[in-house]
Image (cartoon, rainbow, N blue to C red):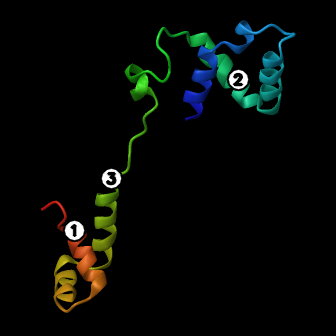
């Protein structure tokens, strides 16, 4: 997200677009003084120069991060504590927790 923001600001060229006497120029200057890391990131992004805006679908993969498979992680967590047979037995006995866990384990089967 940080990189996307920096590249979005850079493509707008705030210091090229506004003159030093312009209020908007002063606002950008103040922002970069308050957030010097953002200013550095924008400077790096400006050096890259792209013909495609950062928010264009063609560039979306540059900002995507690998998502965790929460279904798989939860199933692994459930099965660390008890095996499937124990969960099934408890579910048959009416244990709400086991019923929910078993539903989750079997959700795509």
Residue picked out by circle 2: 40
| Spot occupied by residue 47 in the image (x, y as percentages of width and height) | 61, 11
Q: Say whether marks 2 and 3 touch (CB < 8 Å).
A: no
Observer-nearest of 37 and 10:
10
Q: SS of the residue at dot 2?
A: helix
Q: Position of residue 24 (x, y in %)?
A: 78, 18
- Left or right relative to 40: residue 1: left
**In terms of sequence position, does the residue under pointer 2 or pointer 1 come before the other?**
2
Q: CA distance from mark 1 to mark 3?
A: 14 Å
Which residue in the protein does label 3 denote?
A: 69
* Mark 2 → mark 1, Cα distance in angstroms: 47 Å
* Category of crowding for the residue at label 2, using alpha-carbon neighbours closer than 10 angstroms: few (below 14), some (14–19), many (at least 20): few
Quadrant of image for the C terminus: bottom left
90 or 52: nearer the eye? 52
Q: Which mark is residue 105?
A: 1
Relative image position of residue 4 (x, y in whole percent)? 55, 28
Earlier sequence position, callout 1 versus callout 3 = 3
The quadrant of the picture occupied by the N terminus is: top right
| Residue at 20% in and 85% down | 91
23 above or below 49? below
Vertical side of 25 occupied by 67: above or below: below
Quadrant of residue 98 within the rendered picture: bottom left
Q: Residue at x 87, y 10 (%)?
A: 21
Q: N-terminal of the two: label 2 or label 3?
A: 2
């Amino acid at each position: 997200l940080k990189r996307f923001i920096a590249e979005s600001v850079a493509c707008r060229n705030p210091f090229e677009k506004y003159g030093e006497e312009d209020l908007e120029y002063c606002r950008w200057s103040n922002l970069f003084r308050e957030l010097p890391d953002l200013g550095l990131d924008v400077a790096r992004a400006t050096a890259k120069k792209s013909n495609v805006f950062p928010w264009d679908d063609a560039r979306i993969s540059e900002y995507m991060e690998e998502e965790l498979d929460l279904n798989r992680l939860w199933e692994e967590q459930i099965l660390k504590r008890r095996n499937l047979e124990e969960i099934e037995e408890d579910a048959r006995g009416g244990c709400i927790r086991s019923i929910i866990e078993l539903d989750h384990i079997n959700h795509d089967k």
